[in-house]
Image: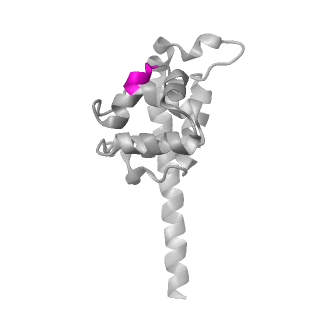
């Protein structure tokens, strides 16, 4: 079962991400293709959440930040826990969402929206694999405690 994102605190987590990246709200807005006032309203709480397209563009533009955490809170790791973010980035490359020299229009809205379902399925696979790794580690830790 998929967890719902915890929208409470989204604005403060987004501000935390921008501070970590050392960029302005305007820089971030330009990178993900939204108007700067939208970023300001997200941070202030006047707009409570962003859409999937903005999330995808943010994660692809800044793969060194865990935007799953920004969107969903501590259930999705820490700001700098990029394991899931990196998996997302790889999945984005795999299904052709990221722009390339051969196809600079890949980041157009239509392409991004059409690929969301493919990305979601790939992310679920990566998350499942990550959960299995965590369970294996937990199992090993338990075995070490019993020794």
Residue under the image location 60 percent in, 23 percent down: 98
Indicate the position of residue 7 as horizontal and vertical percent values. Answer: 30, 41
Image check: 27 left or right of 4? right
Indicate the position of residue 78 as horizontal and vertical percent values. Answer: 48, 53
Residue 124 magenta: no
Residue 84 shows in the view = yes
Q: Is residue 1 above or below residue 38?
A: below
Residue under the image location 45 percent in, 17 percent down: 114
Indicate the position of residue 4 as horizontal and vertical percent values. Answer: 31, 43
Query: In terms of depth relative to the viewer, which is nearer, 122 or 72?
Result: 72
Q: Specify the farthest residue to the right.
A: 101
Query: In terms of depth relative to the viewer, which is nearer, 24 or 135?
Result: 24
* Dominant SS in magenta: helix
Q: Which residues are magenta?
A: 34-38
Q: Is residue 110 above or below residue 10?
A: above
Residue 37 magenta: yes
Q: Specify the farthest residue to the bottom.
A: 147
Question: Which quadrant does the C terminus fall into?
Answer: bottom right
Q: Is residue 11 above or below residue 47?
A: below
Residue 117 shows in the view = no
Residue under the image location 44 percent in, 46 percent down: 69
Which image quadrant for residue 94? top right
Indicate the position of residue 86 as horizontal and vertical percent values. Answer: 59, 42
Q: Is residue 56 above or below residue 65?
A: above
Which image quadrant for residue 12? top left
């Amino acid at each position: 079962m998929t967890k719902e994102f915890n929208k409470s605190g989204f604005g403060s987590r987004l501000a935390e991400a921008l501070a970590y990246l050392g960029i302005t709200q305007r820089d971030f807005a330009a990178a993900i293709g939204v108007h700067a006032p939208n970023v300001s309203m997200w941070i202030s709480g006047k707009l409570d959440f962003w859409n999937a397209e903005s999330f995808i563009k943010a994660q692809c533009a800044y793969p060194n930040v865990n935007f799953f955490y920004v969107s969903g809170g501590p259930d999705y790791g820490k700001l700098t826990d990029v394991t899931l973010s990196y998996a997302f980035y790889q999945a984005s490359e795999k299904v052709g969402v990221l722009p390339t020299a051969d196809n600079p229009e890949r980041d157009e809205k239509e392409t991004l929206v059409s690929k969301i379902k493919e990305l979601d399925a790939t992310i679920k696979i990566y998350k499942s694999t990550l959960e299995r790794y965590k369970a294996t580690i937990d199992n090993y830790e338990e075995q070490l405690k019993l020794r």
